[in-house]
Amino acid sequence: MILSGKEIGARIGKDIFIEPFSKKQLNPNSYNLKLHNELLVYEDKVLDMKKDNKASKIIIPPEGLVLEPGKLYLGRTLEYTKTESCVPMLEGRSSIGRLGLYIHVTAGFGDVGFSGYWTLEIHCIQPIRIYPEVEICQIYYHTIEGDFEGYSSGKYQNNEGIQTSKLFRDFE
C-alpha cells in the first residue's frame, strides 16, 4: 500500500524524516523534493564499471543552467530523508517529464532504512534550463510486509552529497 499525503505528514519525525520539511510540498500521496544547486558530471567520455570514475562539480547559478542532451548529470535533493519502516520510492514530477527531463535513469527504488540525500541521474531530450531549488521529483512510501533488515550498505548510506557510482566496489 502507498501512504497517503496525510499519513506521510502524520509520520514525519516518527519513522519518516524529511529535513527541511514544508507542508506546502506535501501532495495527496507523495512529497515533492527540491533540486540542490550542485551537479556532478563524469570527466571521461567512456565510463568503466570497475573503476571509481572521476567527476567534476558544477554549481547551478540562480539564473539557471542549460543542460545538454546526451550527457549524464548527477544531482541531489536539497532534502535529507530517512525512512525506518517504509520503502521509499522516487519519481520525477510529471511537469518535469513533460519538458523531456528525466530525473532518475533507473534508480527510483529505495530501501527501508535508507538515510541520506537522493542522488538524481538527470538526462534531457533537448537543451533545457534548470534552476536550483525547483521541486524536481516526488518521494512516496510503500508499507512493507513481514520481518525485514534495514538498509545498511556502506556504499550510499548516510551520504553527505551527490554520490557517483560505487559499483566498482562489487568487483573488489
Image (cartoon, rainbow, N blue to C red):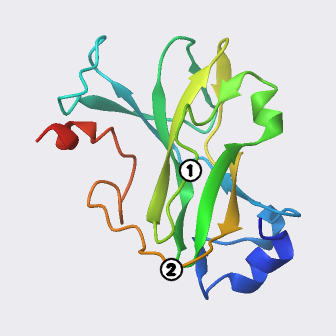
Farthest-out residue, right: 28
Q: Amino acid at mark 2?
A: Asp
Residue 134 visible in this rendered orientation of the protein: no
Asked if 116 appears above or below 33 in the picture, the reply is below
Give left or right: position of 97 versus 90.
right
Marks 1 and 2, how far apart at CA: 19 Å
Question: Which element type, helix, strand or loop, lies under badge 1?
Answer: loop
Q: Residue at x 77, y 67 (%)?
A: 1
Give left or right: position of 76 versus 32.
left
Q: Nearer the viewer, mark 1 or mark 2?
A: 2
Q: Position of residue 96 (x, y in %)?
A: 76, 34
Residue in the foreground of this view, choosing between 24 and 26: 26
| Dot 2 alpha-carbon crowd within 10 angstroms: few under 14, some 14 to 19, many 20 or more | few
Residue in the foreground of this view, choosing between 80 and 165: 165
Q: Amino acid at mark 1?
A: Phe
Question: Which element type, helix, strand or loop, lies under badge 2?
Answer: loop
Residue in the foreground of this view, choosing between 132 and 136: 136
What residue did someone put label 2 on? 147
Residue 81 visible in this rendered orientation of the protein: yes
Q: Residue at x 46, y 72 (%)?
A: 113
Q: Position of residue 10 (x, y in %)?
A: 76, 85
Q: Residue at x 60, y 46 (%)?
A: 35
Asked if 88 appears above or below 128 in the picture, the reply is below
Label placed on residue 23: none
Q: Quadrant of the C terminus?
A: top left
Q: Residue at x 47, y 23 (%)?
A: 72
What residue did someone put label 1 on? 109
| Dot 1 alpha-carbon crowd within 10 angstroms: few under 14, some 14 to 19, many 20 or more | few
Farthest-out residue, left: 172
